[in-house]
Amino acid sequence: MKSSYFSIPFLYVALFSVALLSCDNATDADHDHDEPPAGLELLSSGVVIASQNGTVVSYPSGDAISIGVNETIQFEVKFLHDDGDVIEYHADEGYSLEFQNKNDDVISLSHLEGLAADDHDHDEEHWTLQLTGVASGTATFSVQLMHAGHSDFLSRDFTVEVAP
């Protein structure tokens, strides 16, 4: 009989702790989540250079983004609903864009004009990356939608072919 009195307070403490640590804690007004994206598009000068729909990555021509050595392109990352409509995420709401370059010997990837991921003054540039071909070869990168210190979306790897 004694052990059941001990376990009830322990259960309440455990449930309360889980509620406090939960990302979806309703009492945390600064951490509301918008709908997570179902995919994304990478656009350079308004033209799609790669996209991800669900788990499928595709390219308008071929099976990679093509770029030359010492060539630089800028592209904007647009996150999409499952119906293809663009989702607007804003830096002033705690969202940021991060990337993972899997081979910096072949490509260089950076935020436009060296802007940091937490630069809230330039929202449009905040979602724009700059890709430069460093050496001939193949490389991959992924992008992440960050919110309040954690990832709300991690893309599949995008392939880049760098020609001499």
Image (cartoon, rainbow, N blue to C red):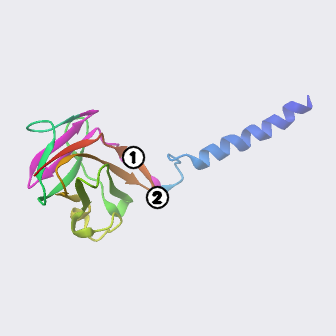
* Residue, disc 2: 30
Q: Residue at x 32, y 68 (%)?
A: 120
- Return the residue found at the far right: 2
126 or 160: nearer the eye? 160
Q: Is residue 41 left or right of residue 149?
A: left
Question: What amino acid is labelled 1 in the image?
Answer: Asp
Residue 1 lies in quadrant: top right
Tell me if I can see residue 95 in this picture.
yes
Question: What amino acid is labelled 2 in the image?
Answer: Asp
Residue 36 colored magenta?
yes
| Label 2 residue SS | helix
37 or 31: nearer the eye? 37
Q: Which mark is residue 49?
A: none
Q: Residue at x 19, y 41 (%)?
A: 51
Residues in magenta, as a range: 31-56
* Residue, disc 1: 152
Q: Residue at x 19, y 38 (%)?
A: 84
